[in-house]
Structure formats: structure tokens, C-alpha cells
Amino acid sequence: MFNFFRKKHDTPAELFFHTDIHSHVIPGIDDGSPSADVSAKLIKRMKSWGLTRLIATPHVTESTFENTPEIMDKAMGTLKSVLQSQGIDIELSHSAEYRLDDLFGRQFADGNISPFPNDFLLVENSFIQEPWGLDETLFDLKVKGYSPILAHPERYPYYHSKKDRYKKLHNDGTLFQVNLLSLAGHYGRDVRRAAEYLIDQGMVDFIGTDLHNEHHADAIEAYLSSKDYRRDRDALQNAILNDTAFN
């Protein structure tokens, strides 16, 4: 007899890259993992997807998560101790996901930021509207030697009907990082379509999990077992910079 209750996929496929540049697994300092033990569970799952290097990116946003390099370093030290005690071997460091707001302006002016290796910097817009003076801010970052990466541009609804704005930002040298969760359909059809558009236009430079919790991990694992994943992998595997940009 057919076993209709057997899972079609016991384990998800592995990712086609090994460095994740966007996650919220540093415990207790933003809306991601609440504790080091939860972080360890998430990181074990990330390892099962073939990830060997994590550059975690806690939120830095005014009035909600006013993190500093010192706060992030302390929380990461706690996490590393727990990972070592549990025998979880992975290369772990952190940068941050910087909201382009007044707090970022002050921290940047003071030199109190945590860039990626080679001075890449992950920045994000408000989800409500594009930041005032965005082009000037991104230009200033480039002039000062930083390479801005715009986090999940597919998730900003005000760009969905203004796709020329994507082209202007990308052509001006801002790199784009798309979320696996967006490709998985986790944020809805419109976001998935925007991510597909960016793939089709050759404007995806990095992929990130943007992992916050076990629910996100479940969504990613379902996606990794899908035809959509195989199609996206084929389109992106020779285009993204995850494993080469930070060496």
C-alpha cells in the first residue's frame, strides 16, 4: 500500500552558498532570538542547510534597538560560550543592520559602528516610506569608503510600483540583499514577485536568511524542498557575492 503519511522530503536541500550575512541570532538585544539557548537551536538548523559562516546583524534602530558595538560584542560573547559548551562549531561574527535614521547618523559620525569585513555596511529603509535624502546618504557612505548593501529591498512596498527606483539605486552602486524568506513567500505574493523581478533584472548581490525564530526556520526549510528553490538557486548561484565579498 502507498504510505500517504510519509514525508516527501525528510531533510531540506542544502543552500548554494555558505556565508549568511543577515540574521538575528545574537540573543536578547533585538526582536530575534531571546536567549543563547534558542540561538544555539537556530544555528544548528542553519548548519544543517550548509551554512558554515554567520555574520549576524542585530537591528540598530532609534528608540527600539539602540545597540552599540559594545552591547553586541557582549551578547555575542555569551552566545559563543554556549555554542562551545554544546559542541556547535561554526564561524560566527557580527556586523549590524542599520536603520537609516538619526541614530545611525550620530553613530556613524562618532565612528561607533560595526561594518562587515572590507567595509561593507548593511542598511535598511523604513517600511513606511523611503528615508529623506537616501541618495545623498548612500553617496556619502561610498565617498567615505563604505559599500552599502540595502537589506531586503523587495520588502519596501513603495518600490513595488516604482521599479525604476530599484534600477536607479542599484546603478548608482548600492548593492541589494534579498531575503530567503521573501523567496519562500513568507511575506506574501507581492514581496515574492518583487524578489523575482530583482532576480530577473540581475540586481541581487547577496542572499540573507533574515532568521529571527523557529517559525522562520520552518518556512526556509519548506522552501528548500520546493521547485521554487531549485529555480531560484539556478538563477542566483553564479551571481551572488556571499562567499567572496568578505574574505
Image (cartoon, helix red, strand yellow):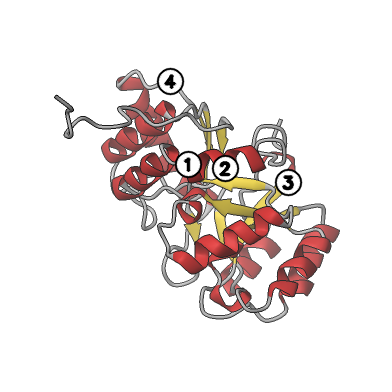
Q: What's the CA distance linking mark 2 and mark 3? A: 32 Å
Q: What's the CA distance linking mark 1 and mark 2? A: 6 Å
Q: State the SS at label 1.
A: helix
Q: State the SS at label 3.
A: helix
Mark 2 or 3: in front is: 2
The local crowd at label 4, few if under 14, some if 14 to 19, many if 20 or more residues have their Cα within 10 Å, is some
Location of residue 120 in the rendering, given as x and y in whole percent from the top left corner: 70, 48
Location of residue 25 in the rendering, given as x and y in whole percent from the top left corner: 40, 43
Nearest the eye: 54 or 233: 233
Nearest the eye: 106 or 173: 173
Location of residue 110 in the rendering, given as x and y in whole percent from the top left corner: 67, 61
Residue 89 is labelled as 4
Q: Name the amino acid type tagged 3.
A: Asp
Q: Name the amino acid type tagged 1.
A: Lys
Contact, mark 1 vs mark 3 (Cβ under 8 Å): no
Q: State the SS at label 2.
A: helix
Q: Which residue is mark 3?
A: 119
Q: Which residue is mark 2?
A: 231
Q: Name the amino acid type tagged 2.
A: Arg
Contact, mark 1 vs mark 2 (Cβ under 8 Å): yes
Mark 2 or 3 closer to N-term?
3
Residue at position x 30%, y 34% from top? 41
Quarter of the N terminus within the rendering? top left
Location of residue 74 by image quarter: top left
Mark 1 or 3: in front is: 1
Q: Name the amino acid type tagged 4.
A: Asp
Contact, mark 1 vs mark 4 (Cβ under 8 Å): no
